[in-house]
Amino acid sequence: MKDYIQWGALHLDVQTGCLLISFLAAFGTIYLKQRITQAQLEEWHLTWNAVLLLIFVWKISYFLLHPVLTIKHPVYLLYFSGGKPGILIGAAAALLYVFIQLSRSSLSLSAFLHILCLVGFSFLLLYGGFQAFLAKDVVSSLFCLIVSGILAIFLTRKKGRLLPTYAALVLMLGLSSTSFFWLKSDETKGKAEAVSTTGLKRGNVPPDFVLKTLDGRKVTLSQVKGKTVFLNFWASWCPPCQAEMPEIERFYKENSRRPIEILSVHLTSEDSVQAARAFANKHKLTFPILLDETGEVSKRFHVVTLPTTFVISPQGKIVQQHIGPLNREMMESLME
C-alpha cells in the first residue's frame, strides 16, 4: 500500500486521509442516527466539541512541551504538533471540558458516553475497512462492510437495553480487528519474503549515487551501509525546509554515538552553492550537505515536494518515506 497519493505537486498522506475521512464519517453517521431516532443532539454536540478541543490542544501542545524552541522558531507551530505527549494533554483538556459542561447543564453522562462509544465503534470499523480496501484484501473489506451494516442496524434503534447492544458491538469490533491484524500480518510477511530490488518502495534498495559535499568530499550512499540513514532533500528557499533543519541538527547531535547518518541533499540545480553554504552556516549544520548540481539524484528519487526524506535501514533498504518537515520526535518514530 502506498504511503502517499500524488496529484501533480500535491501529496496526500494516505493514513492521514483515512483517519480524517473515518472521523468525519463516524460523526456524520451518529448525527444521522440521532436525527432518525428524533433524539436530542446536545450530547452529540458535546462529543464533537470535546474531540475538536482534543485535536486543537494536541496541535498547539508543541509550545507547551518546547516553549523555548517555539519562541525562537514560531513557525514550528505551523508544521509540528506535540506528538504522543500532546495527545495526552489534549485528552486531559477534553475531559476537563466535558466535566465542566456536564456540571453546568442537564446533559446526561450516560447519554454522552453512549454517543462517544458509538462514534468510537463507527470510527474503528470505518478505518479498518479503508485499510483493508487500500491493501486490496477483498475478504477483509467485505467483512468490515458486513459488520458496518450490522452496526447501522443497531444505530437505527432507539436507546433501550444498551448492554446487549454494546456486547454485540464489542464482539463485532473484536472480529473486525482480528481480521485487520491478520491482514497486517500477511502484508508484513509478504514484505519480508519479497526479493530485494532496486527501487523507491519499502523494502527496496535505493539507487546509489555519488555527490560532492560543500567541502569538496565525494560521498556515496552505499558507503554508509550499516547505519540508519536519513536521506533528506531540501532547498534554502523552502519554508518547511527552513523549519526542519534546526530540528534535524538537534537530532543529529543527540544521536552522535548511535549508528545514524544524515545525508542532506541540496537541490543545487534549483538553488545555488552560495545559498546552501549560507544556509548551513546560519543554522550551524554539522551533518554532510551534498550538492545535487545537475538535479539528477532528485529525479532518480522522484522528489517533487520539498522536503522529502527517505529512511534507509542498516541493511541498505528503504523502510520509510516522509514528505514534509521533520522534528526530532518524528525522526525517532520513523526509526521504530
Image: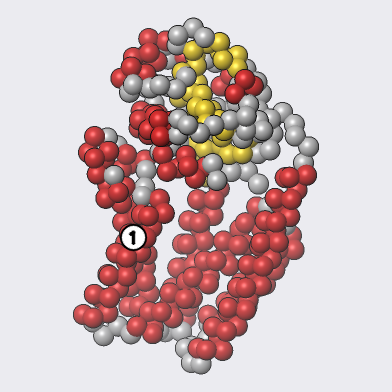
How many marks the image carries: the answer is 1
Of 284 and 112, the residue lying toward us = 284
On the image, numbered disc 1 is attached to which residue? 90
Q: Residue at x 40, y 34 (%)?
A: 254
Q: Secondary structure at mark 1?
A: helix
Percent position of residue 184, x then y: 67, 56
Which colour assignment does the render follow?
A: secondary structure
Q: Residue at x 26, y 85 (%)?
A: 106
> Residue 41 sits in which quadrant?
bottom left
Percent position of residue 171, x then y: 62, 79
Percent position of residue 251, x then y: 42, 34
Residue type beneath disc 1: Gly
Compared to 15, does 157 lie above or below? below
Density class for disc 1 (Cα within 10 Å; few <14, some 14-19, many ≥20) is many
Of 265 and 35, the residue lying toward us = 265
Say whether residue 10 is left or right of residue 73.
Answer: right
Percent position of residue 330, x then y: 45, 42
Q: Residue at x 38, y 22 (%)?
A: 285
> Residue 67 sits in which quadrant?
top left
Taking the view exactly as shown, the residue that stands out farthest to the bottom is 161
> Residue 168 sits in which quadrant?
bottom right
Compared to 39, does 83 lie above or below? above
Of 206 and 55, the residue lying toward us = 206
